[in-house]
Amino acid sequence: MESFQFVDIILLAMVAGFLVLRLRSNLGRRTGHEQGHKSFSSDKVVRINKNDETQNFENDDEENLVDNEINTGISQIINHDPGFSIDEFKSGAIKAFEIILYAFAKKDKETLDSLLSKDVFDAFVGSINERDAAAELLETKILRVEISKINNVGVKGSLASISLEFISDQINLISSQDGKLIDGDPDCIENYKDQWTFQKNLNHKDPNWELASTKSLS
């Protein structure tokens, strides 16, 4: 299976096509070697939450059960695609996180359309349209992003899904068309915790995974 292989996001608006080409070719491959102006803490990531649940476990037995389910899910994916690597997938997912958020800030619908499921794309576009209607600009700077854990890996029929918990440090600013700052602080670094779920039909030849849902855990 081909997988997401990412390049750094530099001037995304100018090279979105190149970034998408790299992104869509390399996720999961084993190489061998709010009223008023909304708060980013709740709305930075558009919430879909379709068929997406987070479980909080209180003891080691339940945590071990989850680990076993995750390992079983990974094995099922590998049975369909022997080239799949969860480590390579996680690395690709981090780059996807960056590309998607920067594309969202820049209103780059073409890039978003290539990486998101229809439901998620429609939600992102709706938020972009609201921003346009308010004549507002969003500037995002991601200072750090990492995956804190895998929340779920599952295969139902031919549909595989992987849910990852992201922790990121960001600066997000909303300004008017004339450059006046409306919301945010350029000197304030905010921490976010989000769950993103990626899905793929394992029977399809298309190697790409799509972002199928997002949820703020902050």
Image: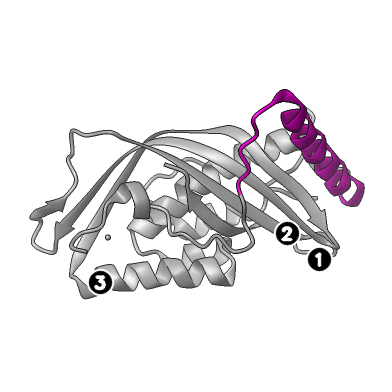
Q: Position of residue 73 (x, y in %)?
A: 82, 44
The amino acid beneath tag 1 is His
The colour style of the image is: one colour
- Residue extending furthest toward the front: 58
| Label 2 neighbour load within 10 Å: few <14, some 14-19, many 20+ | many
Magenta includes 62?
yes
Task: Please tell me whether residue 130 is drawn above or below residue 216 in the rendered image.
Answer: below
The amino acid beneath tag 3 is Asp
What mark, if any, has residue 204 been given in the picture? 1
Q: CA distance from mark 1 to mark 2?
A: 8 Å
Which sits earlier in the primary sequence, circle 3 or circle 2? Answer: 3
Residue 115 can be seen in this image:
yes
In the picture, measured across the screen, residue 186 lies left or right of residue 33, that is left
**Residue located beneath label 3 in the image:** 132
Q: Residue drawn 50% across and 68% down?
A: 121
| 57 or 12: nearer the viewer | 57
Which sits earlier in the primary sequence, circle 1 or circle 3? Answer: 3
Q: Position of residue 60 (x, y in %)?
A: 72, 24
**Residue located beneath label 2 in the image:** 200
| 211 or 16: nearer the viewer | 211
Q: In which quarter of the view is residue 210 placed?
A: bottom right
Span colored in magenta: 54-81
Task: Please tell me whether residue 114 is drawn above or below residue 174 in the rendered image.
Answer: below
